[in-house]
Image (cartoon, rainbow, N blue to C red):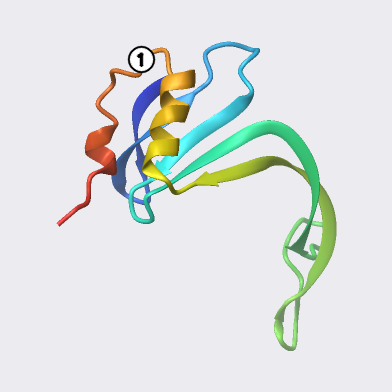
């Protein structure tokens, strides 16, 4: 994977993007607000989600209490959340080809 500078919720951060087909992750991104590193793997799972009901034209249906929803099974990628700074750094060392990238400036506490 390769470390790159990025934006998340209008703040500068870093993410890791795959550079080979064999990479086990779709992407990783550091949330500067919560200091959590989100790792999205290629492992798939079925998850239940509430989604809006739509009419024949793809427009959301509404009822007397707002938008109508229905439960759907959808396939999603498994996500992992790393909060420990050392664990984040170890993952970066293991997978980033450019681990010398200055990602630590995005992990530093903001005043």
Secondary structure, mark 1, is loop
Q: Nearer the viewer, residue 100 or 33?
A: 100
In the picture, measured across the screen, residue 91 lies left or right of residue 74, that is left
In the picture, measured across the screen, residue 36 lies left or right of residue 60, that is left
User: Up-down: is 111 above or below 29?
Assistant: below
Local crowd size for mark 1, using a 10 Å CA cut-off: few (<14), some (14–19), many (≥20): some
On the image, which quarter does residue 6 sit in?
top left
* Residue 22 x %, y %: 65, 13
* Residue lying furthest front: 86
Residue sitting at 29 percent across and 31 percent down?
103
In the picture, measured across the screen, residue 16 lies left or right of residue 41, that is left
In the picture, measured across the screen, residue 29 lies left or right of residue 63, that is left
On the image, which quarter does residue 102 sit in?
top left
Q: Nearer the viewer, residue 64 or 80?
A: 80
Count of numbered badges drawn on the protein: 1
Residue sitting at 76 percent across and 56 percent down?
58
* Residue 74 x %, y %: 81, 48
Residue sitting at 73 percent across and 33 percent down?
43
List the residue tagged with mark 1.
98
**Is any atom of residue 40 visible in this view?**
yes
* Residue 66 x %, y %: 69, 81
Residue sitting at 45 percent across and 37 percent down?
87
**Is any atom of residue 1 visible in this view?**
no
Q: Nearer the viewer, residue 74 or 69?
A: 74
């Amino acid at each position: 994977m390769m470390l790159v500078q990025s934006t998340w919720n209008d703040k500068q951060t870093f993410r890791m993007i795959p550079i080979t087909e064999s990479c086990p992750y779709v992407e990783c991104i550091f949330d500067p607000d919560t200091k959590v590193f989100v790792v999205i793997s290629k492992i798939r799972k079925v998850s239940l989600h509430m989604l809006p009901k739509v009419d024949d034209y793809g427009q959301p249906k509404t009822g007397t209490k707002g938008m109508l929803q229905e439960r759907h099974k959808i396939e999603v990628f498994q996500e992992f959340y790393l909060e420990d700074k050392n664990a984040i750094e170890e993952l970066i060392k293991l997978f980033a080809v450019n681990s010398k990238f200055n990602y630590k400036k995005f992990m530093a506490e903001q005043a």
